[in-house]
Amino acid sequence: MSAVQEPPAPGRTPTPEPVEESRWHGIFREITTGNAIISVLAVVIALAVGAVMIAFTNEDVQESAGYFFSRPTDLLSAVWQAVSGAYSALFQGSIYNFRRDTFADGIRPLTETLTYATPLIAAGLGVALGFRVGLFNIGGRGQMLIAATLGGWVAFALELPAGIHMVAALVAGVAGGALWGGLVGLLKARTGAHEVITTIMLNYIAFYLVSYLLRDGFLKTPGSNNPQSPASKPNSVFFDLLGPGYNLHFGFILVIAATVFTWWLLGRSSLGFKFRAVGENPNAAKVAGISVQRMYVYAMLFSGGLVGLAGINQVIGTTTSGFGAGIDSGIGFDAITVALLGRSKPWGVFAAGILFGAFKAGSFSMQAAEGVPIDIVLVVQSLIVLFIAAPPLVRAIFRLPTPGAPRRKPVPNVTQEVVAK
Amino acid sequence: MKLELRGITKRFGALVANDDINLTVEAGEIHALLGENGAGKSTLMNVLYGLYRAEEGEILLDGVAQHFAGPGDAMAAGIGMVHQHFMLIPVFTVAENVMLGHEETTLGGRLDLAAARVRVKEISDRFGFHVDPDALVENLPVGVQQRVEIIKALSRDAKVLVFDEPTAVLTPQETDELMVIMRQLKDAGTSIVFITHKLREVREVADRITVIRLGKVVGEASPTADNEELATLMVGRAVDLTVDKAPATPGAPALVVSNLTVVDRTGQVLVNDVSFDVKVGEILAIAGVQGNGQTELTEALMGLQPRVLGEISLDGKSLRNRSVRQVLDAGVGFVPEDRTRDGLVGAFTIAENLMLDRSNKLPFVKRFNLQLSYLADFARSKVREFDVRSQGIETPVGRLSGGNQQKVVLARELSRDLRLFIAAQPTRGLDVGSIEFVHERIVATRDAGTPVIVISTELDEVAALADRIMVMYRGRIVGIVPGDTPRSVLGLMMAGANPQEGAAA
């Protein structure tokens, strides 16, 4: 042992870091698992800003603004017309349409909302589970595509009895997503590769792989030059929940089950306990004998599997007539938003998924009825994320106290001042 | 310069951190501010330094009221602060560090490093600091780094110097040198506020002592007061500073470590060929200044270090190259030195933290399911047994005081069947009352027949607990000596000297 280097002088070895987590880690946790009130308020602000945009883009409003000083009431009523019209169209397109005669027709928008919400919730749960373990899964797109590939192939290529065929396709899809996600976990555990980079790269790999398979591989429809797979066999397809008149299918029930499962996994199981320990403080988890690496792999398997559920839902639930490389339709990324808005809590994600499903369903009728561009809804969605990512901004707007920080003044004082004015 | 704080009150929400505090520091006086952790010493000094705005009260310098909006104002008014964690940039030279923040430039905007160098030299010579302005800070021993901090403050014409727990990172010898420096500064007319909770240092160097408890000034004392008197003022009740402990009755060696070497990723040797044993029913204290391989040694024992040579065996079974899980399952209890980083999950509740290292074992888990009602009962009984003060077992541990956090860690580790108990810096940052409790528990564990290793940088703690003392320096064992070895000998050994006694025991 004498040949080895002289050990460090005592002064050189840095004293242990002051007890403070890295700033990024703290911010990550606050954004992903912060207060539910922030979520609600973020939606409120985003809708308010959205209202401003609706008003600005409305032609009547622009016209009446031209003679604002001679008849200001015109402008105000035009703004009111535009905003209330848009938002009521959004409501009627997503919850209940009062213009229909029967309840069965009137409630259809709600079933559309739930149909749109189904994959968002599933993928949102996957991303949220990752967040709770301290992992940022941006690979929803790739995981959905691989799920669609494997599950879709089972659905269109095999001949199986009813029921069994659906289950086989479902299992293949979830396994595909889990595989694609687990790969990320494995890379992180073995080599320390950061999941943000690997998931993004695996998105590209999945996309071009699927594109190739659709053109020249086993996903190609025989006798067609369209890069689209054959239609799923009727036996493999999710059955309708409310009969053929509605789009809502069995996938929604699966998503409820997935929410319950995720809730149990994170809150009630020993594996979830370890997941959360690793997510909150990997150092302490390691010292307590929890294998952090193994947890990363398991967490990415579950995360990918849940996102895979969203992928297979598209193929044998929503778009059963065959799929292209765009089958994910951005759900993998919307899922991040849904997970953030749901504060990475299973039922929070469920609620957030339904809200975003409603936005999606309602935006079409908003455009049709009021001529409000669909982009406004996308802006509102993006604003929600923006406000969630900047909790201090929301707190400043609503004068909420900063958690954990000393209050500058007792809260009652503030309200008194406001009342006095 | 005479510093006066009058009626300072600082509230954080409902918590009153400083309650009507009056403090006068005469020019050329060393005034010790004594109090337990959380008594409000640091808050008071942050008010003084302009980091917090007090709700009530005023700060006077030489009778003139001051209004500090930030540390810049405080510095300009002549207040300097030597922080516990040095605010130095390791890859900068001493001169560069000293000029940082008020850089002087020559014509054309070039940094006037020469002026800074002269400045450092001048101050260093005046007080005999022996600091080379061109040395890189990262190459300097901790004691010298601290002097750089002092030079930094003095170069900004500080007339009042605040030392915040300055001795926490120093060897006994460096501490003595710091005392000399403080006296020199005092003779040069600088007023010094010396924040500490170490009674011995206070009595050695302070002219006057103000004791703070729970945000209030509870009394003044003269340096002639004895330890018990000061401790009683600090804690608010009579404190027994000595640990009641019967002589050890060591049995057979339980843990045997032979030729253990730990290497880091770059090939640097952190623990160098260390051999020792710990017997059933004894406490082996590992003493040494922070950063001499103690941390890496315990990590190697726990299976937390990947590059380990040599042999570790507990009750005849090898522990080398085992996972942490296997080491824990072999019956090793571990209190890590940094409890908030390695010992606890701050966002988890007390109950959850109590099962942290048993998360896949009956009775806490049955077929993948957490047994929440069992856990609640278990947590309630442990909270009672270890006197954890909280609002209930659902309180996140991050909200507990350091003492109560450490009790949670102890409760978790000591409630397993232990074959070996390792406690690293078990009382770091704890108040006197909690220290008493932790020490009692450690001795009780020994008396129950468990071999115990205590790693500590505090000589008081080592002296109070140890049956044998092993001193480490630069990764090696300087010597293993009996528990009653005099402090002065230990101090020399911690600096690397190998006295004759070191060969004994």
Image (tube, coloured by chain):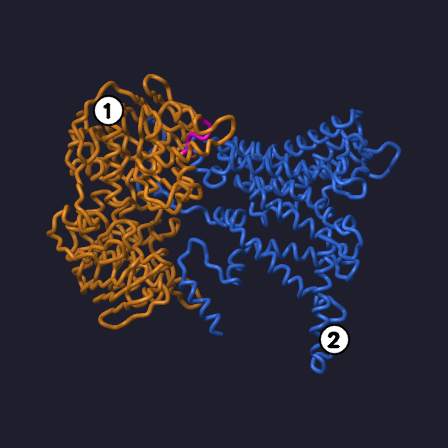
Q: Quadrant of residue A9?
A: top left
Q: Which residue is denoted by mark 2 in the rendering? A: A64
Indicate left or right for B244 with A267 as reference: left
Whether residue B425 is visible: no
Q: Is residue B359 magenta?
A: yes
Q: Residue at x 17, y 25 (%)?
A: B504
Inspect the image, locate mark 1, and give the three-letter code of the amino acid beneath it. Gly
Boundaries of the magenta span = B355-361
Q: Nearer the viewer, residue B409 or A298?
A: B409
- The 10 Å Cα crowd at callout 2, few under 14, some 14 to 19, many 20 or more, is many
- Figure colour of chain B: orange
Inspect the image, locate mark 2, and give the three-letter code of the amino acid beneath it. Ser
- Figure colour of chain A: blue
Indicate left or right for B79 with B230 as reference: right
Q: Residue furthest left?
A: B224
Q: Residue furthest front?
A: A102
Indicate left or right for B309 with B437 as reference: right
Tell me which chain the residue with mark 2 is part of. A
